[in-house]
Image (cartoon, grey):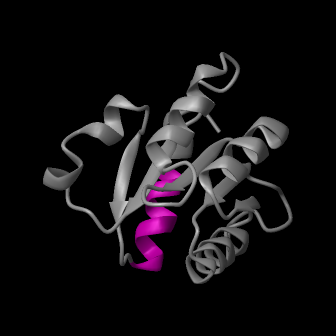
Amino acid sequence: MSDNAGIPKGKILVVDDEQVMVELLCSILEREGYKVYSAHSGREGVEVAMKVRPDLIFMDILMPDLDGYEATELIKQNPTMKDIPVIFLTGRSAEEDGGKAFTTGATTFLRKPFKHQQIRDLVKLTMMSVGN
């Protein structure tokens, strides 16, 4: 459980077309005290991001309609959201990505499968680095 139980730590958006992945991430993040929103496609992720203005986004790369790269580019085009950190979730390696994650605005990326502690640590570090 988080050190600040009952005090919201910030808003996080999880965008992934795999329901199991969304449920897992939401569960981990909610237990840590974050307000978590979810979307199941890139297009829905952009829409939810525009509405809730999250403090952090977890974005799957391979999704139907808009992939994570395209969705992130659309989100980052909005001047009020250009500084929101985006953590890409992927089964791909850094070599397969070829740096595309970073050129589209990602802060970092995390390979699937991951450990719960990796999520907690990465969120804490990312939120601290942006002042949340």
The image quadrant that residue 127 belongs to is top right
Asked whether 87 or 45 is in front, the reply is 45
Q: Which residues are magenta?
A: 115-125
Image quadrant assignment for residue 104: top left
Which of the image's four quarters has the N terminus?
bottom right
Q: Main secondary structure of the magenta part?
A: helix
Residue 105 to residue 40: above or below: above
Work out which residue is located at the far bottom of the displayed protein and give it: 20
Task: Give the x, y percent position of residue 79.
Answer: 66, 16
Q: Please, is residue 5 above or below residue 88 in the view?
A: below
Residue 87: percent from left, percent from top: 46, 50
Q: Position of residue 3 (x, y in %)?
A: 68, 66
Image point (74%, 65%), residue name: 33
Could you say where residue 95 lies in the image, as x and y percent from the top left? 13, 52
Image height of 99 relative to 45, above or below: above
Q: Residue furthest top?
A: 79
Q: Quadrant of residue 32?
A: bottom right
Q: Quadrant of the C terminus?
A: top right
Front residue of 49 and 36: 49
Q: Image point 40% across, 69% down: which residue?
A: 118
Left or right: residue 92 versus residue 22 is left
Nearer to me, 14 or 70 = 70
